[in-house]
Each structure stands twice: as structure tokens, then as C-alpha cells.
Image (cartoon, rainbow, N blue to C red):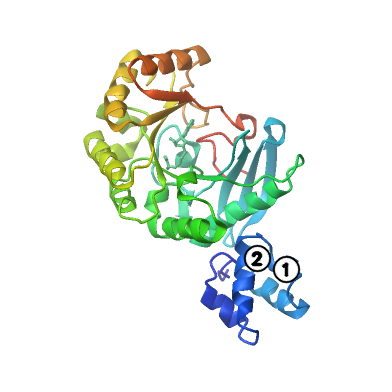
Amino acid sequence: MAAVPGPYDATRDRLADLMADQPSYRVEQVWRSLHVNVRRPAEMTELPAALRERLDSALPPALTPVAESVSDGGETVKWLFALHDGARVETVLMHYRDRTTVCVSSQAGCAMNCSFCATGQAGFTRQLTAGEIVEQVVAAMRQARAHPEGERRVSNIVFMGMGEPLANYDRLWAAITRLHDDIGISARHLTVSTVGVVPGIRRLATEALPVNLAVSLHAANDRLREKLVPLNRRYPLSVLTEACRSYLAAKGRRLSFEWALIDGVNDSFKDAAELADIAVPLGAHVNLIPLNPTPGYAVMGSSPGRVRQFRDRLTDLGVNATIRRNRGTDIDAACGQLAART
Ligand code: SAH
């Protein structure tokens, strides 16, 4: 199927081509309508009807919702989207008391093969375009606007959906630029999560926009981390932590470590001590989450009691650690459960 670029892969030049017969202010008008008002061309009632129709057929949405599930009393919404070639991605919208976060996918599938992650178990399909990434946020913004208890504004974006964002660097960065410059999300509310793609972290450190960096650590010794996160063979902990240190020095942003607690695997006091040895010098914040069950990994998440003990031990060792709520477990929307099943 020929790839028609969706509305958010179109550049201003492409819009100008489509509107060559129009007054020149129209390009900016449509651009704002797409990004600030998150409207579809068909909804742009400020445009002459013929132009509206022309744009509507030239810029069809890149994402078609295949399924939508709601949980946590409406506070978590997950979508499964089909792309023009049939590839599928998932996006999750989460409302909290003080913020509204969208968890976006950066690739269809993932090639990193982390043993406990449902996306990794399903393998890699393809890179997403920048527009396919941006349009996930737009879809969530449209939904948030229509929240039953009044309009909500999407405030935070986390690249913690399907895929490894730093393995799709150029398109990721083009999407981040759009989200920041055109949609108006501030850099400190954008978080890139990586399994530890060191060249990507180094490149992030050279960008003008200081985004937050999250590293999915899960183990603080190489022997265990190689088993959980195969990429650790290429970029062992010493190299990874050095890249984190340079990122902090360059950007002064908050660094966080993600740690999925796996029963009997990485939830001992020894694991906590190893983690503290890495986190304390970096001033890193640790996000703890009990492992969510996935079909391809037989080990369970740590019990709530164990999770609290692990957190308390980290606190005693001087680590800033929080236990994250498990959003959307019942709709397979929780961390690591995104696998584009229908
Ligand atoms: N590839 C990036 C982005 C994906 S983020 C990264 O790894 O950071 C998804 C987050 O969920 C990562 O922290 C990942 O390690 C975590 N995760 C994966 N599988 C999980 C599971 N079964 N339970 C809890 N967290 C999981």
C-alpha cells in the first residue's frame, strides 16, 4: 500500500503545495489548527468548504484506532492503532491528580529482546515515522479534551510505550521537536526512556532541548543485567553509567532509573545495595514497579510487602525511590505489557 504521509508527517512546505492557490496566511492557520487545536482538516470550519475537503483527502490520519480500552474508572485509556501498512502500536493516556501523561510508542515492536517485556517477546516490526509518534499524542489530547469531568490538558509525554526510542533517534527527535515547538509541551515534561543505548544518550546530551532521561536498569551488576537486558553485553554498566553522568553534566536534568521488581531475581537487599552504589553518586531517582505478568516470562512480580521493604532499604541507603502505581494492569496497558494483540 502506498504510504500517504499523515497530517503530522506533512511539513509546512507540503501544506503550502496543497494550498498553492490560497492566501499565504492559510499555511500558518492550518498548521496551528493541526497542532494547537488538534483538529482534523474536516473540522477546520474556519476554512472554505472546498479547501477543507481537499486537505481532508490529502491528509488522512496515519493512525486508525482498532481497539480502545478504559480502566481505573476512566483515568487510564489504552488504544491499539493500526498504521497504513497494517503495523500496530499501542498508546496509553493516564490522568493523575496533578498531571495528564501520554505514554507513546516509538517503534512497532522492539528489537531489544528484554526477557520480561511483552513487546520484546513479540519482536520488531518497523520504525515509526515522526508523524506517527506525534499523532499518538494528538489522539490522546483529543480524548483528554473530552474528559467527562471537564477538559484535561496533556502535560507530560513519556516515551515508555512500545519500542526503544534511541534506536529510532532521528524520527524520535523530529517528533520531540514538533511536540515542543508546535504543540507546546515543555522539555521538562518530556521523558525519553531507554534500555541503555549509549550512543543515543551521548547524542541526546548534544541537543539544545534538555529532556528528562529514564534508564531501564533492572539490575545493577552485569551478570544479572545481561540476562534481563541483552543490550547490556554491548554497553555494560560502567559504560552506561558514564554516559548517564555526562548527560547530567551537560543537561542538568533529572535522571531516573526504572526497576521492575522480579520475585527472587532482583529484589534482595544485595540488589538494593548494588543499585544504591550506582544511583547515589548520580543523584538518580529510582522508580520501582512490581513486574507485570507477561506470557513469555514465567517469573512473578515481587509481593507488595517485598516492594516496600526494597524501597525502605533504598531510602536507608540514601536513594530517592518511589513505588509506582500499576496503571491499566487489567487492560494489559501496564508497563511492559504492550504487545499489540487484537
Ligand atoms: N525501550 C525503552 C522504552 C520502553 S519503556 C526502555 O526500555 O526504557 C517500558 C518500561 O517498562 C521500561 O522501563 C521497561 O523495562 C519496563 N517493563 C518492561 N516489561 C515490564 C514488565 N513486564 N513489568 C514492568 N515493567 C516492564
Alpha-carbon distance for marks 2 and 1? 7 Å
Q: How many marks?
A: 2
Note whether 295 is above or below 206 in the view shown: above
Ligand 1: quadrant of the figure: top left
Determine whether label 2 and label 1 are within 8 Å by CB: yes
Note whether 54 is above or below 326 in the view shown: below
Quadrant of image for the N terminus: bottom right
Note whether 266 is above or below 239 in the view shown: above
Q: Which residue: 59% across, 37% down?
A: 333
Q: Amino acid at mark 2?
A: Ser
Residue behind mark 1: 44
Residue 268 image point, x, y percent: 36, 15
**Tag 2's secondary structure?**
helix
Residue 130 image point, x, y percent: 49, 60
Q: Which residue: 46% across, 59% down?
A: 177
Using residue 310 as the reference point, say whether residue 327 is left or right of it. right
Residue 155 in view: yes
Q: Amino acid at mark 1?
A: Met
Residue 186 image point, x, y percent: 49, 50
Residue behind mark 2: 33
| Mark 1 surroundings within 10 Å by alpha-carbon count, few (fewer than 14), some (14 through 19), many (20 or more) | many
Residue 85 image point, x, y percent: 57, 61
Q: Which mark is residue 109?
A: none
**Tag 1's secondary structure?**
loop
Reading the chain from its start, which is encountered first: label 2 or label 1?
2
Q: Which one is nearer the viewer's eye here, 277 or 67?
A: 277
Place residue 43 in its image quadrant. Answer: bottom right
Question: Does the residue tagged 1 have its C-beta within 8 Å of any atom of ligand 1?
Answer: no
Residue 129 in view: no
Q: Which one is nearer the viewer's eye here, 196 or 315?
A: 315
Q: Which residue: 59% across, 39% down?
A: 99
Quadrant of image for the C terminus: top right
